[in-house]
Image: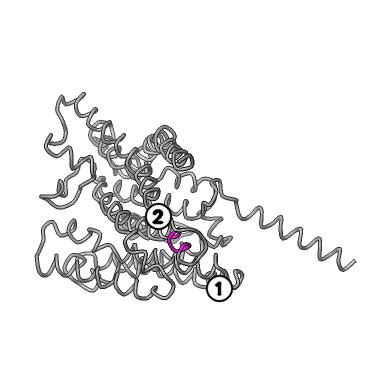
Amino acid sequence: MKNFVLSAQDAFRQRLTRHKVPGPVIAGEMPALTGLRGFAAVWVMIYHAWVFSGPRIITFDFLGTTFSVTSFISTGWSGVQIFFVLSGFLLSLPFVRWKMGLRDRPEIKMYLLRRVARVFPAYYLQLVLLLGIGWFFQNKLLIPFTEIPQYLLMLFVPTPLGVGSSPLNGVWWTLPIELSFYLVLPFITVFLAWKRRWLLLGLALAVMVGWRWLVVDVLHAVPTTLWATQLPGAFDSFAIGMFGAILHTRFYEQGSMDKDRYRLVLKWLLPIAVIGFAVTIKWMTREYTTYWKSSPLFYLWTPVYSLTVLTIILAGAARLVSVDAILGNRAIRFVGLISYGVYLWHYPVQKLLLKKSWIGTFEGYQFPWLLLIGAVLTFVAATLSWLLVEKRAIASCHTYLKNK
């Protein structure tokens, strides 16, 4: 009888686990991290809708209490930092696994081909469409003919190397930062060994601080935002993601710590990270006017914020039930799959709605309508981009590499 009861309890726990933790759609995928990428893209979209509509304090009433969501909305641009930490974590994993003896050394050529297949086709599609729309409706090329090579290479970096701070799409400025990390990563894998994890963090923070101090306090480079956020100035976020890849591989995949014990540690750290996430957002909201003035906020905010994001990433990578339920469900995971398209398309869609639709002349507050209608059109464009271009490019790349 006792054995029967224990067997029934085990079967019940297994069924409960199957229902709570959705299995990955793609082999090797970490569903919650796909969802986190979707959250980041939507957060950036909300932020731009708020900015384009004219920033206001936004509140809502619930059970007789007024809540403000202005801090959350006004810091939506920091979804980009989530992308950086995620890239550092996910792209470093194969190299960390190699360093820890869990797989063969990744081939750099294959790694670079996968990166090119992931980011360039959707970008080229949008570039061609925007230029075509501009030519059809305005009978002119929307970018200088001499800058076409820079656009083809995503050189949205300070002049004279790039096109400066005014690309055709306002979100494109982040693309060369990600691309720079893709190119640098294979050359810094020496820091992905377990014994060099603290050296990695220390050097990354030193590079970030040194670069920002140089461009802001020494060179007084203009535009400050574009100069300060190039890869050296954003390297702390990527490196914190790399540091997380080392921890995840060591404790979870290599088994240096019992998985249940490791998950328990993350379970206790997760609420602290969520609170820290909220605190850093509030900190930025209160002192944002000092951010580009070589203040403590300027040097400390991105590493502190990135550490809170990393904890959420580690919890998602370890398949914590609570994180999988929130970020790994089918809806948010789908948004994550099309998140690159959401990021690329929301900006021109919102700009077009303000210029060419009734939203632009709407007498009330434009934000709710701009966000709602813009989100629908953006999701349609992003889904088409995923199905017609991105998914096929990724599949073609995998087929090519498999048959080689």
Please provide percent x and percent y for residue 91.
Answer: 40, 56
Task: Determine the image quadrant of residue 301.
Answer: bottom left
Point 24% across, 31% down: residue: 356
Q: Height in image: 117 above or below 104?
A: above
Quadrant housing the C terminus:
top left
Q: Residues within 10 Å of mark 1 (few under 14, many from 20)?
A: few
- In this figure, which residue is indicated by the disc labeled 1? 256
Q: Residues within 10 Å of mark 2 (few under 14, many from 20)?
A: few
- In this figure, which residue is indicated by the disc labeled 2? 60
Q: Give the residue furthest to the right.
A: 1
Extent of the magenta region: 93-98
Q: Is residue 224 a member of the stretch shown in magenta?
A: no
Tell which circle, 1 or 2, labels the residue nearer the N-terminal end: 2
Badge 1 amino acid:
Ser
Q: Between residues 375 and 248, which one lies in front from this camera angle?
A: 248
Q: Which mark is residue 360?
A: none
Point 60% across, 51% down: residue: 22
Please provide percent x and percent y for residue 23.
Answer: 60, 51
What distance separates the C-alpha of mark 1 from that of mark 2? 47 Å
Answer left or right for 155 relative to 25. left
**Dot 2: element:** strand
Q: Height in image: 17 above or below 140?
A: below
Answer left or right for 205 relative to 85. left
Please provide percent x and percent y for residue 80.
Answer: 32, 55
Point 30% across, 39% down: residue: 123
Badge 2 amino acid:
Phe
Quadrant housing the N terminus:
bottom right
Point 49% across, 48% down: residue: 332
Please provide percent x and percent y for residue 380.
Answer: 41, 34
Q: Describe the colour scheme in one phrase.
A: one colour
